[in-house]
Amino acid sequence: MAKIVSFASGKGGVGKSTTVSNLGLLLARGGSNVVVIDLDVGGADLHVLFGELSPVLTLSDFLGRRVETLEEVARPVSWCPRLRLIAGTGETLKNTNPTAQTKQRLLRHLRKLAADVILIDIGAGTNYHALDFFLWGDIQVVISTPDPTAVLDLYKFVKLAATRRVLSALGSRDPAGEALLGEDFRSIEQLMAAASADGPQTEAIAREALKSFSPALLLNNATGDRVGVSRISTVIKRFLGSDAEVLGQVPSDPAVVASVRRFLPVVEGDPKSPAARAFAVVERELRARLARLPEA
């Protein structure tokens, strides 16, 4: 069964699609069978970064049941056969707001894909869909830049993703804790206090769920020091009680923009550029983390 890596952020424009396209290409060139899927519902554009301006099939065809399986939508990137792309949706209002049943069907088919690794590119923000897609990841990566607004939005995303993770665990495993699902918690501390008050079983499940939520950090447009990483790590520690692991940093580099304008990931368009070399370092770290995951 494929291992899933999800990529999300609180703010748009921080380089999620750029990151997914470059890491997907590097993992495929390293021998893995990779699928990248664009789950930025309503704002999908990952396909453009591979030069696929008019995809033959998209996620809309699967969601609309014009094809039976997600496998049919996964199309090989012409210049890297081990890498396949599932182009995103957004052409209709219905597709931008999938139901819970639709998301469950999507996850089932995602797990059945013939791949070693699946990279999910998720839309920015803290809506339920973004949070749920993010939590599908066996490895979860949050992306930011050093910009204060990006860090603030990441703070909100991590808080709500942690809350969603705990509530999902309670809803699936603890009938006594289901009463908490209808509450609106302003902080993870408030949720944990309510779980504790509900009883030892509810508290134990909530603490286990929170402990298992450990997103990795990737900083784009890094300046070369660790101020940005330290700031974001502090934000996550405030909620999770432990330091966030850093997946890596990618510097601001005009080669990234130049490659995007050529419809290429920078590791293909300018492999000797600072950003391409940084993505190679991140890919090695990600590959090592994937190797440490238990086999399904």
Image (cartoon, grey):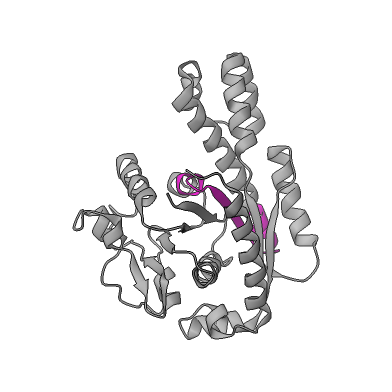
Q: Nearer the viewer, residue 68 or 243?
A: 68
Q: Residue at point 76% right, 54% down?
A: 231
Relative side of 166 to 113, left or right: right
Q: Residue at point 41% right, 61% down?
A: 37
Residue projecting furthest to the top? 199
Q: Residue at point 34% right, 42% down?
A: 104
User: Does the magenta run of residues contain 152?
Assistant: yes
Residue projecting furthest to the left? 66
User: Does any portion of residue 260 appear in the rendered image?
Assistant: yes
User: In which image quadrant can residue 172 be found?
Assistant: top left
Q: Residue at point 53% right, 67% down?
A: 27
Q: How many marks?
A: 0
Q: Which of 185 and 26 is in front in this view?
A: 26
Residue 290 location (% of width, % of height): 57, 54
User: In which image quadrant can residue 151 be found?
Assistant: bottom right
Q: Would you place residue 108 above or below residue 62 in this image?
A: above
Residue 254 location (% of width, % of height): 63, 83
Q: Would you place residue 169 above or below residue 280 in this image?
A: above
Residue 118 location (% of width, % of height): 45, 57
Residue 271 location (% of width, % of height): 60, 83
User: Does the magenta run of residues contain 199?
Assistant: no
Give the magenta range: 132-153
User: Does any portion of residue 45 appear in the rendered image?
Assistant: no
Q: Would you place residue 102 above or below residue 172 in this image?
A: below
